[in-house]
Image: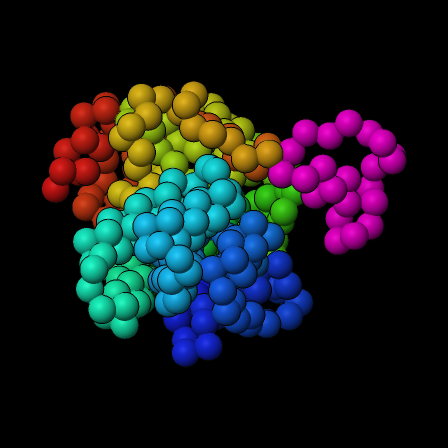
Amino acid sequence: MVETIQWADAGVVMIDQTRLPREEVYVTCRTYQEVAEAIRTMVIRGAPALGVAAAMGVALGMQRVEGEFRAHLDRVCATLAATRPTAVNLFWAIDRMKRLALKLEGQPHDQIAAELVAEAQRIREEDIEINRAIGRHGAPLVPDGKRVLTHCNAGALATAGYGTALGVIRAAVEAGKKIAVLADETRPFLQGARLTAWELQRDGIETTLITDNMAGYFLKRGDIGCVIVGADRIARNGDVANKIGTYSVAVLAKENGVPFYVAAPLSTLDLSLASGDEIPIEQRPASEVTHVFGVSVAPEGIHVENPAFDVTPNRYVTAIITEKGVARPPFEETLAVFAQK
Ligand code: MRU
């Protein structure tokens, strides 16, 4: 399994996802500011992986305290929180680290530093366990002998390992099901083409790459057993923010009677939001739309919009697969139960 992110003596080591699949290069972030920059520039991405990166960023930032303890902690947390707005796992992890740091305040500094590293490593380990549990709960839902459509990358690369949506696919394959994957390329950042296709091919899982606008064609043909995607934030009512284009796939799935599953850890659940309308949507640079690998594909000066995520209303979601089990509508009730378990 690919190592997405790890703590090492030299700092936080990540596989550089901007260079895959052409090059497998690992970068080491030696300061919390470097971790923040790696998040901003998508060296690391995917909601659970962002949570792990942010946690390790806080641990790294607290190895040396400059000035007053609380002011320094606030500065480190604020820098990491200001990187990307949509994936709630980032804020969940920062909060968890901050709560521990405040609890440890007053202890010898070496102890605080070591305990924060241990906590960040725990978040990483837990994430892998959670993904395996999501896989176990989700595998029975995947029809044998059919194709699974996925969008973006919700795989090992988007998590500490194994993946959420791809974790369900991996678990179904491990259970002996004959499954092939249809991967949307996921314009504009091409997480599907560059990352999902790469990690599934590496695992020997049969994968076919399509452009995003082909999804309707394949869903209508009838050989897709289900759609499985990840999530960046899920509101209390089950509305799901995920990579731009997910909403279109969900509508097409419903139109064609194909189940649409969301696989996500409970740390992706934001119970403070009543609906998906309140989820902040990241707007990314125009150059991601006007350029493909540095080559311009649009006239200079053209107006561009580049929302990185969309919200799929809960009525299109067949079920949400979590580490605690499979939540079905009405999500307002079922998700609340899982959150308390
Ligand atoms: O912009 P990205 O690549 O961070 O977006 C990633 C996604 O939208 C994933 O589907 C989501 O984070 C779930 S990852 C398990």
- In the displayed structure, does residue 46 sit left or right of residue 65? right
The percent coordinates of residue 67 (x first, y second) are 40, 57
The percent coordinates of residue 5 (x first, y second) are 43, 66
Residue at 18%, 31% in the rendered image: 336
Residue 26 visible within the image: yes
Q: Please check the rendered image and state whether residue 212 is part of the magenta-colored stretch, yes or no.
A: no
Tag count: 0
Please tell me in which quadrant of the rendered image residue 108 appears.
bottom left
Residue 140 visible within the image: no
Between residue 120 and residue 218, name the one nearer to us.
120
Task: Work out which residue is located at the far left of the displayed protein and give it.
Answer: 341
Between residue 132 and residue 116, name the one nearer to us.
116
Task: Work out which residue is located at the far front of the displayed protein and give it.
Answer: 67
Please tell me in which quadrant of the rendered image residue 288 appears.
top right
The quarter of the image holding the N terminus is bottom left
The percent coordinates of residue 89 (x first, y second) are 36, 45
- In the displayed structure, does residue 17 sit left or right of residue 177? right
Range of residues picked out in magenta: 284-306
Residue at 45%, 68% in the rendered image: 12
Residue at 37%, 27% in the rendered image: 239
- In the displayed structure, does residue 298 sit left or right of residue 48? right
Between residue 59 and residue 335, name the one nearer to us.
59
The percent coordinates of residue 145 (x first, y second) are 39, 51
- In the displayed structure, does residue 86 sit left or right of residue 291? left
Residue at 43%, 41% in the rendered image: 87
Colour mode? Answer: rainbow
Task: Work out which residue is located at the far bottom of the displayed protein and give it.
Answer: 9
Q: Please check the rendered image and state whether residue 298 is part of the magenta-colored stretch, yes or no.
A: yes
The quarter of the image holding the C terminus is top left
Q: Main secondary structure of the magenta part?
A: loop
